Image (spheres, grey):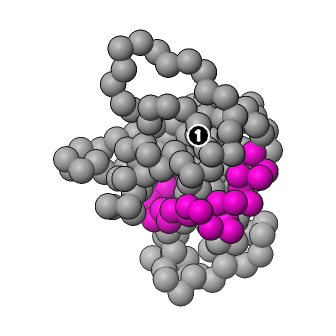
């Protein structure tokens, strides 16, 4: 596998015409997921490792994508188990499957949490009241209750429970399912930004 450098927004990994086009299209799909609520990339699945060593996966909403930094932005409640999982073990996996395009993308990433800082405050202010209301729910998410709790009402106090997850990926696997022959590729980024890419057997 050869190392290659990042080369522009439209070709984040310039490794040759075909592979470069693959990763550029993958990045565009994530960008579309932020803007288009109907996109499959709007709701990726994110897997963490629990305190018991077992994997945990859940669907989340993609709030932002930075192609240059290879970063997804997501929001979560700091009282929930996924927040604790990430604090203990920052390595996470992300999975998206777009049935219409027949494309699957898997990411290997490291998540960083932002709570009560400028990043979290800016994201909180951008959120809709209905979305921010979720962070005021009591008791905390995942707690056992005798009956479903009432819908939460928006309160600025919910900010104390709000967290931003900055998920930076260093590995991307792309799979396209097609009747004429499936295609699969892997991209890996080194700490210095160099990128290696290869075709894989589907």
Q: Residue at x 37, y 44 (%)?
A: 81
- Judged from this view, the residue extending furthest toward the left is 52
Q: Residue at x 73, y 69 (%)?
A: 11
Q: Give residue 14's quadrant in the image.
A: bottom right
Q: How many marks?
A: 1
Compared to residue 131, the image places residue 20 above or below, namely below
Compared to residue 92, the image places residue 5 above or below, namely below
Point out the stretch of residues depicted in magenta.
Answer: 105-127
Membership of 94 in magenta stretch? no
Q: Position of residue 116 (x, y in %)?
A: 59, 62
Asked whether residue 138 is in view, the answer is: yes
Q: Position of residue 29 (x, y in %)?
A: 70, 48
Q: Give residue 91's quadrant in the image.
A: bottom left
Compared to residue 170, the image places residue 106 above or below, namely above
Q: Position of residue 88 (x, y in %)?
A: 32, 61
Q: Residue at x 71, y 55 (%)?
A: 123
Which of 17 and 43 lies nearest the eye of the viewer?
43
Q: Residue at x 65, y 71 (%)?
A: 69
Q: Position of residue 110 (x, y in %)?
A: 45, 65
Q: Quadrant of the N terminus?
A: bottom left
Q: Which residue is mark 1?
A: 135
Membership of 123 in magenta stretch? yes
Question: In the structure shown, which secondary structural element does the residue marked by tag 1 occupy?
Answer: helix
- Judged from this view, the residue extending furthest toward the bottom is 192
Which of 42 and 158 lies nearest the eye of the viewer?
158
In this picture, residue 119 sits left or right of residue 198: right
How crowded pointer 1 is (Cα within 10 Å; few <14, some 14-19, many 20+) is rated as many
Asked whether residue 176 is in view, the answer is: no
In this picture, residue 120 sits left or right of residue 130: left
Compared to residue 25, the image places residue 189 above or below, namely below
In this picture, residue 54 sits left or right of residue 45: left
């Amino acid at each position: 596998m050869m190392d290659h450098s990042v080369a522009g927004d439209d070709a984040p990994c310039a490794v040759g015409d075909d592979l470069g086009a693959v990763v550029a299209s993958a990045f565009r799909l994530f960008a579309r997921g932020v803007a288009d609520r109907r996109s499959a990339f709007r709701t990726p699945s994110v897997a963490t490792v629990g305190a018991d060593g077992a994997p945990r996966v859940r669907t989340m909403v993609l709030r932002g994508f930075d192609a240059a930094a290879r970063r997804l932005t997501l929001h979560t409640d700091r009282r929930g188990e996924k927040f604790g999982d990430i604090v203990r073990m920052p390595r996470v996996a992300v999975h998206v499957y777009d049935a219409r395009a027949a494309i699957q993308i898997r990411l290997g990433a490291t998540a960083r949490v932002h709570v009560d800082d400028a990043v979290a405050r800016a994201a909180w202010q951008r959120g809709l009241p209905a979305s921010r209301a979720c962070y005021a729910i009591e008791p905390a998410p995942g707690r056992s209750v005798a009956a479903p709790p009432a819908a939460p009402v928006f309160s600025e106090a919910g900010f104390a429970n709000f967290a931003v997850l900055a998920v930076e990926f260093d590995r991307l696997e792309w799979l396209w399912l097609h009747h004429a022959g499936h295609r699969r590729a892997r991209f890996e980024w080194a700490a210095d930004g160099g990128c290696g890419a290869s075709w894989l057997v589907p």
